[in-house]
Amino acid sequence: MTARRQKYVWHHELHESWGKERLYFWRLAFFPTYDRTRITEAVSSVMAGNGVKSFALYETLGLYDLVIRVWLPVSKNFQEFERQLEGRLQTEQLQVMDVFTVGSIVRHWPWLVHGSDREMRKPDESLTENAPLLDEMVRGNRVVTGEDAKAAADFVSRKLLAPCPPHRGIKFIIVVTATAQLTTLAARTALREELLNILVTAGDRVAASLYEGSGFGQFLILGGVSEDAFDLISSDLIDPIISARLGPLYGARPYTYVCAGIENPLVFQDELPADPEEQPRAPSARELLEGDEDQKLEVKGSALVNIDRWFRGDGEKVIEDEVLLKGVVRACVALLNTDGGHVVIGAVEADRYSDVDLSEVPRVGNFACIGVDPEFGLVASNWDRYALSLGDRINAAIEPPPTGLFSLLASRVGDRTLAVITVRATAGSWYYVKDDPRLYLREGNATKVVSGPAADAYREAKSAYK
């Protein structure tokens, strides 16, 4: 039997903050005919036409034939999207279509903290509060689609992606409705806690997520059990919900849809909308070097090697920790604390080295592009290993580690490879060179260091609009 590929899902907070998406469920009924293949193709075409990158189709038994889970971009008009979906499905004998708008994700089982049935893991706030870098989204999508399994551990460790193990068990959906009496915040909170407690009591025998919202229900539970534990849906969930103390008081009751077949959902994809046409693109080294260093650009000859010693000294290329700390690390910290920007590694000001023969080195603007290729042999055998090593060194030299707040890309100029570090501006956080309490900032075309009252005044002023 062919091994089933490990699935991964993005954290729901990243769908909201990075993807600018909102979660909806639609339930659909068709009569008198139901053509699974044609309907699946129709729904998928509407999703593709509206830029929906994350959706799932669950085939259900009973009155409703399909339940669709959709992360819809907020840039899309909801009514227009719904009209398109309904119009496309009318030719497939659509009879019933209604929506559940998710207000909050109370519990999402792939993100539960190990050993807990209630607490969820979350990405660092510095990631969710800032716009994503395109390459970060693209790399994560490649993990999700199985194209870059090697990067999975990195994204999982940073709580950006979670493994969602494929299983051939029984999927189910429980919609919890209530009468109009459930109108106060206190009543909804009480029912939410009651439902959450029921899921916690069920434990790991039932893998279930809980959504709160409005539409065809007040709450929705989406989950699964193993094939030999079908009775748990009734004994551990339906019966406790019916007998819950708030059921008789507010008319809360469950309606359960069991998903058809063992391969459910019919369609499942969970990518972020990393569209190069809509997302910011990291500029190339050539584009950056056509101008001069400024508030958002620092240029370094090397990340690890003392260029003066190499060019004007004994010609040795030796890694020196001070080169990294005083050069790239300080530049990255300054950009993190100011407005973000870029660090280009592998270029020097040609005028500064007019006494050195650089006639074979490609030029861009005022810079001679020597490249970072000479460093490969010192720390790694190729670009990927070099980038990984350099990224780890930068993270280890900054407090707190700016994981996910910078990207490191290769950029070719002629026959030379340059490195472009793109640093994201942060909101509400301050970064420091390890064991150095001074505050590094970017001012004009230079990295500036401040401390004491001056640093306090800057942080206070910047926090007012950060």
Image (cartoon, rainbow, N blue to C red):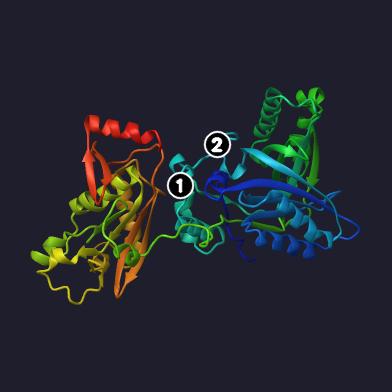
* Amino acid on which the number 1 mark rests in the picture: Arg
SS at mark 2?
loop
Q: Tell me the kind of residue under disc 2.
A: Gly
Residue 299 occupies quadrant? bottom left
Quadrant where the C terminus sits is top left
Residue at the limit of the structure toward the right, as seen here: 32
Circle 2 packing at 10 Å, graded few (<14), some (14-19), many (20+), is few
- Of residues 17 and 391, the one nearer the viewer is 17
**Residue at the (34%, 65%) spot, across then down:** 287
* SS state under label 1: loop
Which mark is first along the chain, 2 or 1? 2
The quadrant of the rendering that contains the N terminus is bottom right
Q: Residue 396's x, y, as percent?
A: 31, 47
- Residue visible at 74% across and 56% down in the picture: 262
Question: In percent of the image, x 69 and y 44: which residue is there?
Answer: 223
Q: Which residue is mark 2?
A: 115
Q: Find residue 325 and report its horizontal and vertical position in percent.
A: 22, 49
Residue 83, percent across and down? 76, 54
Q: Does 155 sit above or below residue 146?
A: above
Q: Is residue 416 left or right of residue 169?
A: left
Q: Is 204 placed above or below 287 here?
A: above
Q: Which residue is mark 1?
A: 158
Residue 19, image x, y percentages: 55, 51
Q: Residue at x 26, y 60 (%)?
A: 292
Between 427 and 186, the one nearer to me in the picture: 427
